[in-house]
Image (cartoon, rainbow, N blue to C red):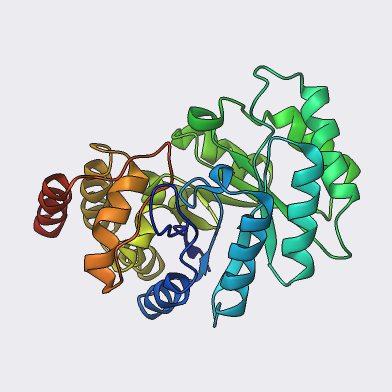
Amino acid sequence: MPELFAASLTPFTTPTGAVDHAWIPRHLRWLEANGVDGVVPCGTTGEGPSLGLDERKAVIDTVLAHRGGLRVIAGTGCVALPETIAATRYALERGADAALVLPPYYFKNPADAGLIAFYRAVCDALPPGGKIMLYHIPPISQIAIPVAVLEALLASHPTAIYGVKDSGGDGEHTAMLIARFPQLNIFTGGAPLLGRALADGAAGGIFALTNAFPRELRAILDAHQAGGQVAAAQRHVTALADTLKQHGAVPSLKAVVPALADLPPTAPRAPLVPLDAGAAEALLAHMRAV
């Protein structure tokens, strides 16, 4: 059965402050109560690249300690290979279901051989039974994960590759991955593409929007399972997703999630900038109207 994940937020006390660990369990319980199957901490929405390695480990610890019935796929991709290995081993050894591994994103246009070497080194260092999900998000990382890289990794480490999160924004690309790699769990990272991805056979979706609107996204999965009105549920979600583009997903979500989930205020970390009070109020009113 397809699964709904939240690319979960990392709460900060201020834009240059520490992680607010007390905030996390309350958000997890709200997500679980509203139809979410799992969370992906320390990914893009979780501002993983803005966390130090020790901070990332601490966030993973907090999520795993308070996961309840939620599945956890921890974001562990870093620029440096040794830190990626350290974060990935840490998450898996402490009980994460899998690790979401971003490609090393500082040097652009890497050769396929370089990406293969990077991911093979991560796979070689996995604890017994450990699995990784590759993170294809070229609009942000500017590093695509080509099919040739997937094929090479499946040839050398067939049991270590759990799947792919496709956040490229191209439904055709997601459909191609689903058809070409039936042994992998292919998740869409684009909420406006969920209905199509499910029809194509996706394993589910991992979204920023789930932090604020889990029930609306759950409605798409439920309609798909029941043979119901997927298109109507999808239009609703797409309208909500479009509102996040005005000020950026992370600042926008941190402006509205506290009000929607009855949580304390929280901030994005610099260089992201929080919305001012007026913009936050207008955004919340618009999303509620949608």
Location of the C terminus (image quadrant): bottom left
Of residues 148 and 255, the one drawn nearer to the viewer in this rendering: 255
Residue 154 x/y as whole percent = 82, 43
Give the number of marks: 0
Residue 269 x/y as whole percent = 43, 46
- Judged left or right of residue 101, residue 218 is left
Residue 197 x/y as whole percent = 46, 48
Q: Is 114 located above or below residue 101 in the figure?
A: above
- Judged left or right of residue 175, residue 160 is right
- Judged left or right of residue 212, residue 208 is right
Whether residue 184 is visible here, answered yes or no, is no
Residue 287 x/y as whole percent = 16, 54
Q: Is 146 located above or below residue 223 in the figure?
A: above
Residue drawn 46% across the image and 65% down it: 20
- Judged left or right of residue 92, residue 232 is left
Residue drawn 49% across the image and 60% down it: 19
Of residues 196 and 254, the one drawn nearer to the viewer in this rendering: 254
Residue drawn 77% across the image and 23% down it: 112
Q: Is 214 located above or below residue 52 in the figure?
A: below
Whether residue 76 is visible here, answered yes or no, is yes
Of residues 268 and 8, the one drawn nearer to the viewer in this rendering: 268
